[in-house]
Amino acid sequence: MKKLLNTLFVTSEDIYLSLDGENVVANRDKQVIARYPLHTLQNIVSFSYPGASPALMGVCAEKGIGMAFCTPKGRFLARVCGENTGNVLLRREQYRIADDRRKSCLIARNMVFGKLFNSRWSVERTVRDHGMRVEREALSHASQGLQGLLRQVMDTEEPETLRGLEGVGAVTYFNVFDEMILNRKADFFFSGRNRRPPLDRVNAMLSFAYSLLTHDCASALESVGLDAYVGFLHTDRPGRASLSLDLMEELRPCMADRFVLTLINNRMINPEDFQNQDSGAVLLTDSGRRTFLKAWQEKKRETLTHPFLKEKLTWGMIPYVQALLLARYIRGDLDAYPPFLWK
């Protein structure tokens, strides 16, 4: 089991990271403002323009510390990777499966099943906990629709059909997503999923959460020796971590979507934490990102019992556990890939 250590998030736009012995140093205008021991870090995520020194990137690659660079608005740019140390036989089998439509669909449909299952449970949880405050009929109808799709997903062996069912499920789920927002509806409303750029506060938070989750999934996959860029549901595209997006699908509803709903419904984030651009884009401010990231890290430290392993883990360990289970299936140690089914 891979131990989940701390992640260093650099949210200020003018910070330059450098190396000093066994420490990562944060510099502003050539002045040291903070330092962190490398042995306490598993990942570094920078939202700063200046970036990091080659020496620091080299040491992070050597020590296996994940290092990712994003724009100040949260768009993923690049990740520092060292020499591949994963099992070459594992990766060769991964590539063979990715080239086989039927075999790749068997994995992808379990991931889509997990996504629809978790989406349905999120809807059901809202009905159970807040039945007197929501439109029960609309939510129940969506839940039934998602339930019906689960059976169809497990019966298909065609990638195109699977993607179509996943799309129907996403529409069904997001059509009632606004019903799960319980407070401050005038400030936080959801009329549909939009991105590049997000056009409202809820979509801005969803996009930011998905970016963070994608990075966590990529790090998890690489840690078990899999190629994060060769997927089974998402096809190959230069620069796209397709397998990370695959793994993220089943985790979106429970790790990202519910987290965003919690921030809104518990009044942990405010309208002042967003800024409107002339282009129409709505983005988190610097202070808004700090609030978001602090809550994200706290969420990752919360514990739950893994539904397949029956072991108590932190939420931050879930991508790593799922990556391990996927690697075990590809090696032939498991009869099927067990998706994360949240309850």
Image (cartoon, grey):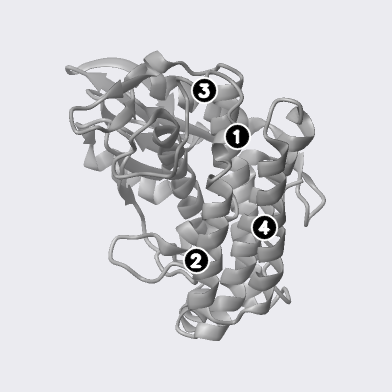
Above or below, 247 against 185 in this view is: below
Q: What residue type is disc 2 on?
A: Leu
CA distance separating discs 4 and 3: 25 Å
Tag 4–tag 3 contact (CB < 8 Å)? no
Residue 81 is situated, as x and y percent measured from the top left of the image, at 35, 54
Q: Tags 2 and 4 in contact by the CB under 8 Å rule?
A: no
Q: Earlier in the sequence, mark 3 or mark 2?
A: 3
Mark 1 highlights which residue? 179
Residue carrying label 3: 185
Q: Secondary structure at mark 2?
A: loop
> Which quadrant holds residue 75?
top left
Mark 2 neighbour class, 10 Å CA radius: few under 14, some 14 to 19, many 20 or more:
many
Q: Is residue 169 left or right of residue 219?
A: right
Three-letter residue code for mark 1 = Glu
Amino acid type, label 3: Lys
User: Which residue does the numbered mark 4 point to in the structure image?
Assistant: 145
Looking at the image, tell me whether mark 2 or mark 4 is earlier in sequence order. Answer: 4
Where residue 262 sits: x, y (%)?
A: 60, 27
Residue for point 78% across, 55% down: 309
Image-based side of 285 in relation to 176, left or right: left
The answer to the question of whether label 3 and label 2 lie on touching residues, with beta carbons closer than 8 A, is no
Q: CA distance from mark 1 to mark 4?
A: 16 Å
Mark closer to the chain start, 4 or 3 = 4
Which residue is depicted at the point 45% across and 20% down?
Answer: 187
Q: Which mark is residue 226?
A: 2
Label 3 to label 2: alpha-carbon separation: 42 Å
Query: Real-space Cα distance between discs 1 and 3?
Result: 10 Å
For the point 61% across and 56% down, the residue is 115
Secondary element type, mark 4: helix
Mark 1 touches mark 2? (CB < 8 Å):
no
